[in-house]
Image (cartoon, grey):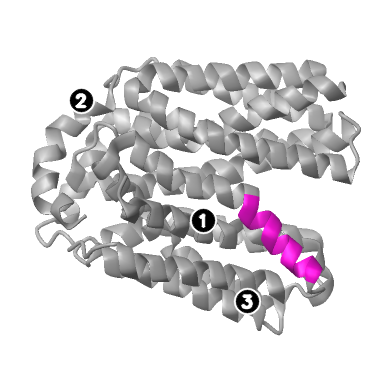
Amino acid sequence: MKRSIYVLALGAFGIITTEFGVVGILPTISRQFGVSIDTAGWLLSAFAITVAISSPFITSFTTKINRKLLLCLVMSIFVLSNLISAFSTNFTMLMIARILPAILHPLFWNISNAIAFKEKGAKGVSTVMLGLSLATVLGIPITTYAADLFHDWRASFFLSSVISLIAFIGLLVFVPSIPGDKAKSEQDQLVILKDPLLWINLISTICTLSAMFSSYTYLTAFLEQITKLDGAQISIMLLLFGGMGTIGNWLMGVALHKNVQLTSRLFLILLITVQILAYYLGGIFIPMIIIVSLWGMIHTGGFLVSNIRTTQSIPHQALEFVNSLLTSSYNIGISLGAFLGGIVSSYYGVQHVLSVSILLLAVTLILSFFSFPKKITESEETGQEEFTASVCENL
């Protein structure tokens, strides 16, 4: 696989580390700036909401600009925003520093996923998504550890800035110039919105991500209250969850390349099954080790399944625009899932967040029976020749 795709995965690692790395230092920020923990939580929520709103618009407005230039611009903004965050003197300044990169955040995902899919199909997107998985496993823990090691919350942002800087250099050196499409008009992209199957897939994506994060957001609370684990045991479980996720991401890419429809349905069935097992066996330590391992392996594939399921039959001229809609759907799903899980956890107990997840996954499974092409190769064959002439030669 070409180095450019691996560099895009490194960029994904830097961006996700910046987006979610703040989670580990929220209590410290809360104390530092004298705000409540739920107010501090808006550093994450506001980021996600900004991404969801800006994604379709920022992509449409930049279709004619060189793709490498945009990728480098996004990473440079992330470097700068992390530095501003580190030097923030009040909570408002910190919030502004977080929102600014969130506006451009979708550009990186939309462009990098489009490049990866055109170049290597599901395997290419899987490689980029690997950056997301590794950020969950390594990026977030190491930025939290940096803050603890230096006894200063700013260290977390300095480290995120360094990671983004390395990714910026990688993009500058290894990604070739990819001209924007001067002939592409906004109307050419918007015509895809007439496809009812696209809307079914976007709704499925929102349901899938809502299901995943209605339970995953409260996994720590579940392990603490139901499985009765202490802090060290929970940390090991979360590391196991994330580590198995990197393996699952690779396996999902291989499976999707062979058969999208079957793999998508199998993903949903397996995630439903593992959460049913967690519901009934959550209080038993040894089975939960196995369940968390399988859960992590399956969970991470949700992003990849949603991406390939939606983009496999999209004409290449509309691919970045559809990826922008996917990015919005991801963030809407994450926010909605965390919201629904929080309500259910507060009123009925943390164990019942699994019921919400299972219900949403069941709805998505029903939606999956709306027909769509079985193999990525079918969609690749229709647009590969045109793409090769315009973009592949640059890669």
Where disc 3 sits, the SS reads helix
Nearer to me, 347 or 246: 246
For disc 2, the marked residue is 378
Sequence-wise, the earlier of marks 2 and 3 is 3
The quadrant in which the N terminus is found is top left
Nearer to me, 234 or 33: 234
| Closer to viewer: mark 2 or mark 3 | 2
Kind of residue at disc 3:
Ser
Q: Main secondary structure of the magenta part?
A: helix
Kind of residue at disc 2:
Glu
For disc 3, the marked residue is 85
Left or right of 55, for residue 97: right
Please report the bounds of the magenta region as a residue range: 138-149
Q: CA distance from mark 2 to mark 3?
A: 46 Å
Residue 380: x and y, percent? Answer: 20, 33
Residue 172: x and y, percent? Answer: 33, 70
Kind of residue at disc 1:
Phe
Q: CA distance from mark 2 to mark 1?
A: 30 Å
For disc 1, the marked residue is 13
| Closer to viewer: mark 2 or mark 1 | 1
